[in-house]
Image: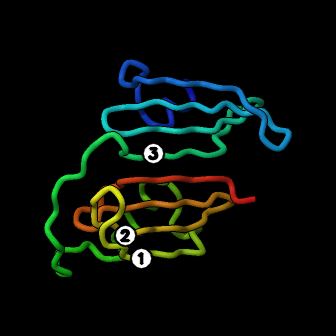
């Protein structure tokens, strides 16, 4: 729990609905850690032996989406800004990012207009939904690329 909270930059007093389970996946024991903070649900898989984060996901599943009018293309931040926002959030060196795919998705299932951003850095694969108007991270996920 401590590792997940440090990664999410939260205190235990900030979260609710905490679930921790020890599981085995492909011969490796890992902790599945889930909790809610505000409107966001956090899910972590953490290696039980070394404490490394194997996979994490944050989604704003517990909120209703604000109503947004159909966007004017001039109001969108653009693909480059969406990629920059995702890379900054991931905390990786942009010079080491590869296999980049950025697409304007229009309205996603949460009612937001988003850019879907996918990239790899090192042996980790990142997947983001970035608000197409303001660059806010709406959803992100990363996992070790086998």
| Position of residue 52 in the picture relative to residue 111 (left or right) | right
Q: Which labelled disc corresponds to residue 27?
A: none
Of the two numbered discs 2 and 1 on the same chain, state the one appearing first in sequence: 1
Image-based side of 113 in relation to 47, left or right: left
Q: Which mark is residue 103?
A: 1
Between discs 1 and 3, the one toward the N terminus: 3
Q: Residues within 10 Å of mark 2 (few under 14, many from 20)?
A: many
For mark 1, give the secondary structure: strand
| 93 vs 31: above or below | below
The extreme bottom residue here reads 73
Dot 3 crowding, Cα within 10 Å, few <14, some 14–19, many 20+: many
The image quadrant that residue 126 belongs to is: bottom right
Residue located beneath label 2 in the image: 115
Disc on res. 58: 3
Along the line of sight, the residue nearer the viewer: 112 or 3: 112
Residue 22 relative to residue 95: left or right = right
* Disc 2 from disc 1: Cα separation: 5 Å
Q: Secondary structure at mark 2?
A: strand
Q: In the image, residue 144 lies at what x, y percent? A: 68, 54
Contact? badges 2 and 1 (CB < 8 Å): yes
Residue 117 rendering spot, x and y as whole percentages: 46, 68
Residue at 86% of width from left, 39% of height from top?
27
Per the image, label 3 sits on a secondary structure element best described as: strand
């Amino acid at each position: 729990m401590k590792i997940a909270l440090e990664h999410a930059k939260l205190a235990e007093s900030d979260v609710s609905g905490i679930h921790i389970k020890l599981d085995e996946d492909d011969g490796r024991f890992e902790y599945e850690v889930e909790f809610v903070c505000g409107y966001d649900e956090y899910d972590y898989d953490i290696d039980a032996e070394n404490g490394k984060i194997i996979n994490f996901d944050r989604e704003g599943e517990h909120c209703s989406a604000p109503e947004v009018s159909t966007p004017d293309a001039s109001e969108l931040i653009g693909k480059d800004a969406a990629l920059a926002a995702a890379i900054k959030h991931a905390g990786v060196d942009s010079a080491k990012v590869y296999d980049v795919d950025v697409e304007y998705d229009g309205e996603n299932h949460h009612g937001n207009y988003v850019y879907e951003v996918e990239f790899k850095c090192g042996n980790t694969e990142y997947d983001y939904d970035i608000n197409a108007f303001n660059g806010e991270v709406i959803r992100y996920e990363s996992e070790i690329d086998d």
